[in-house]
Amino acid sequence: MKAVLLLALKSAWARRLTLGITLVAIALAAALLLAVERVRHDARASFAQSIAGVDLVVGARTGSVQLMLYAVFHSGAATNNIRWDSYAAIASHPAVAWAVPLSLGDSHRGFPVLGTTPAYFDHVRYADGRPLAFAAGRAFAGDIDGVFETVVGSEVARELGYRVGDRVVVTHGMAELGPEHADKPFAVVGVLAPTGTPADRTVHVSLEAIAAIHLDWAGGAPLPGLRIPAAQARKFDLAPREITAALVGLKNRADVFRLQRHINAYRGEPLLAALPGVALDELWQTLAMVEKTLFALSVLVVLVGLAGLTATMLAGLDQRRRELAILRALGAGPREIFLMLIAEGLLVTALGVLAGCGLLAAGILGFAPLVQAQYGIHLAWRAPSGNEIALLASILATGLAASLVPGWRAWRMSLADGLTPRN
Amino acid sequence: MTDSAIRIRDLVYRWPRQPRPCLDIPALEVVAGERVFLHGPSGSGKSTLLGLLGGVAVPERGAIELLGRDLAGLGGRARDAFRADHTGFVFQQFNLLPWLSALDNARLPCTFSARRKQRAGDAAVEAARLLTHLDLAPELWRQPAAELSVGQQQRVAAARALIGRPEILIADEPTSALDAPRQQAFIDLLLAESAAAGATLLFVSHDARLAAHFDRVIALAEINRAGMADAS
């Protein structure tokens, strides 16, 4: 039996060009299927790990998914801000342990600028509850001296080469080439350690800074004739009047629904408090149809690849009639002939699946920064999960099924031909 | 006393979905060590007979005994094993696996038959000995079979049929792809080698001119009643 398998291997090697092309097709299909599964999984994981420790996200009344997307993932824009006094009222609610205000809207070379308080660095957690850590430097001061200080995320520092002490100019709005707040540069005082969350791609400043750079602005443009230099800006009242959203942590998580109802019924202005986990579930439910469609398509691509295997092997059989007859004359039974074909099909499928894993790894290494930048999804190479191994195993099983057809035909052929092929 | 290598009695074979049998052979006996020329025009059922002797087909009726064993009484796998152990084949052409070297082709039967492997001793050494004996230059041994000339390929095929000294050699038109001067040389080679190995040789051809040096010449048409019925 071992000898027969060795012959099958040598025979396959003699046809390496056609089988190789089939193998590439299977590899691409397997890589696609794995990539769809991997992106789906990692998207959920990286979204979920960005909201660790936050019990409620509060913003202007909108959809909870939309609120999550702009407040936590900095994707899309807020329709409305909320007033500072609304925030203050929530923050002082007896059930609230901590609250962190968020003010968004400006950017720095494509990275969102987030106005917040130093408490942000104490309360925001990621992954399984780890706090943000500084790779270098410290948090901005949060008082009048710290107005023009900034803390950049790890990706921002890496991509733009920033270190503590560098100067940063903020752009108004989210466009990369928008008007600049060039008169009020910021000094980098801290660089965050990598987290795999949107914090990596964020430029953090104080709420007062957001107010300061907009002192002499109105309606998205500098006021003509009005120039307030940075040094002067400190003398103005920089207390924030509006923020975009707030993250809220509770003393007791059991209070979450009570507080949510309280905020949603707030009389001062229409507010929305979203439970991050529930909002994400809602998001995934919305995307479930898309995910299923993508998955079904990639399954189809795998089936097309394996149908190619069947077709290639069937076409090859006609040219191999003589080979099979020789093996028969040497004493091979139809059973051995059948097994040779199955072994060949399984080998090509298995190598294709392996190559597919390689392609996926290369793809992740190549595209992870882009995906992180564009979609905030943190992709990392790691050993296949149980789910992915099950997918790979089902590709192999389908490859086996695809080999049954040529195997069965070779069986029939070797019985009909005997020692003398009829062509 | 002389043992029979091949003995056929009351053999009838019919192709599937054919009304009349293509073989109907009341009796055929080849003694061990005998070198027989079986003559028959193409389409006379030669290939079918070889398939039956090889055990890849079973007769509708009658017995085919090789070395005293009735093939019809064996199962498919036992017939395959019997063929691997006791029979060497040389065909018309394209005898070899094109992607294996000449040497690997010659030793191939030893991978299918433990008996022939054991009788060959060291398969590689024995294959080399046979190839040398059959006058194939050593520099050709490692070449893929596809790169050899037809004559060289037939000699490799002969070495493959002979390795491990099977009791029966069956040659099916092995010279038809060779030019005339080489035909007789190849036949002489087969006759000499089968004599040296003590093997029974059944040489099948449509070309009666090649029959000169054999112990016995049998015309298939004379022993096959189905063939006669066809002719009438």
Image (cartoon, coloured by chain):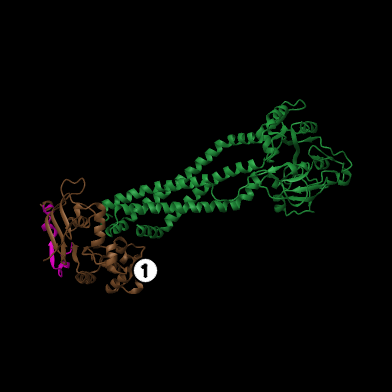
Chain colours: A green, B brown
Relative placement, left or right, of B134 versus A167 is left
Locate residue A212: give its quadrant: top right
Task: Give me the chain letter of mark 1.
Answer: B
**Magenta includes A45?**
no
Q: Quadrant of residue A38?
A: top right
Q: In which quadrant will I find the C terminus of chain A?
A: bottom left
What span is in magenta? B206-228
Q: Position of residue B55 (x, y in %)?
A: 22, 55
Residue A70: x %, y % from top left? 69, 38
Left or right: B4 with respect to A296?
left
Q: Nearer the viewer, residue B30 or B92?
A: B30
Residue A256, above or below A383? above
For the point 63% across and 47% down, the residue is A378
- Number of numbered discs overlaid on the protein picture: 1
For image coordinates 34% across by 63% down, the residue present is B98
Say few, some or many: other residues with alpha carbon within 10 Å of mark 1 (under 14 / 14 to 19 / 20 or more). Answer: some
Q: Can you give x and y, in whole percent of width and height, for residue A339 in the image?
A: 35, 52
Q: Secondary structure at mark 1?
A: loop
**Residue A237 place in picture, x, y as percent:** 87, 38
Q: What's the residue type where badge 1 is placed?
A: Gln
Q: Is residue A189 visible?
A: yes
Kindly identify which residue carries mark 1: B143
| Residue A227 visible | no
Answer left or right for B74 relative to B227. Answer: right
